[in-house]
Amino acid sequence: MARYYVREWDQRYEVDDKGYAYRDGRPKRAGPLDYIRLKVYGRAQGIGWRKLIAVAGVREAPMIFGIFCKFLEIAGDRDRDSRGYVEDTPDEPLSFTMGLHEKDVQTALNILCDPRLAWLQKEESSKEETTNTTQPTNQHSGKVPGVSGNSKEFLGEVDCSSKKPASRKFTKPTPAEVTAYANTIGFVLNGQEFCDYYESKGWLVGKTPMKSWQAAVRTWKNRRSEETPTTNHRCIHCGQPADGTSKDDTGQTYGWCRKCQPKLYARRTG
């Protein structure tokens, strides 16, 4: 697992319990952030942008900046004790969460961690460090404990091509498990709708077997949050301004709000 810290998170992006820029002595907002502050002052914007162009190049800089903004959203969608971090794990890869090619995400991570830019700081997981420090020492081999002797490993480029991580068997969730998990991240989701959708797809994400249904739920949440509220429609159940629209069996468009969406789904399938 690779963990990345957004440098100067508290100074640039954190907010207090009132929603203002965080300052020492004030309590941080407890739950996930509603938005990310990107305001800068003076010449700082031009300096940062020129640094990015110098490291990434003119063609790649806009894409890298866009990916960095998405990293900020992910880092802000956490409780106050864990905000400011982005994690890339085999079970929940960033490429899947963001819907991007793995090569593009890795390129962005390398550039953002480059010392000339240093917008991100990579932190190795404690589990990996524990594994390296507990390997047995061969006193007659002349090798450093935990080091294979490969020169790349001394440079932080460990060659793991001969080691295949143990794959975890995917277990289909129940609708109740999906609904309960969605509630823990502040997302209203009908678990039966989620399970029916992926059951019809053979539990595939594109052409790849699903590895983590929790990551899929978070992806649904991110996509829903990016939808533009539909102000021209009202929820057909409660009459409030609609958060989204759908079509019924006759092709008519109707509005729904997040609060009433589970009730509407139950009525439609009942």
Image (cartoon, helix red, strand yellow):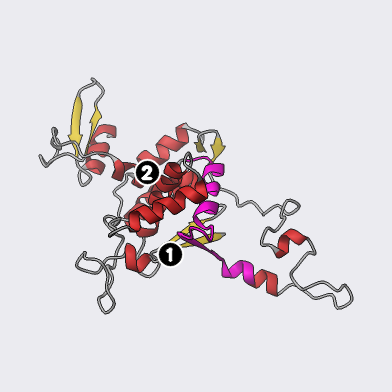
Q: Nearer the viewer, residue 206 or 34?
A: 34
Q: Is residue 236 magenta?
A: no
Q: Is residue 230 left or right of residue 94?
A: left
Quarter containing the N terminus: bottom right
Residue type, numbered disc 2:
Trp
x and y percentages locating residue 55 in the rendered image:
51, 51
Report the magenta residues as a range. Answer: 100-129
Identify the secondary structure beneath mark 2. helix
Residue matched to label 2: 220
Q: Is residue 202 left or right of residue 17?
A: right
Kindly tell me whether residue 166 is visible in this rendering.
yes
Q: Is residue 179 left or right of residue 88?
A: left
Residue matched to label 1: 7
Residue at left offset 14%, top offset 33%: 233
Identify the secondary structure beneath mark 1. loop
Which of the 4 quarters of the picture holds residue 12?
Answer: bottom left
In terms of sequence position, does the residue under pointer 2 or pointer 1 come before the other? Answer: 1
Residue at left offset 30%, top offset 55%: 38
Residue furthest to the right: 140
Q: Residues within 10 Å of mark 2 (few under 14, many from 20)?
A: some
x and y percentages locating residue 29 in the rendered image:
27, 67
x and y percentages locating residue 76 in the rendered image:
35, 59
Quarter containing the C terminus: top left
Which of the 4 quarters of the picture holds residue 126?
Answer: bottom right
x and y percentages locating residue 182 in the rendered image:
35, 52
Q: Is residue 55 left or right of residue 42?
A: right
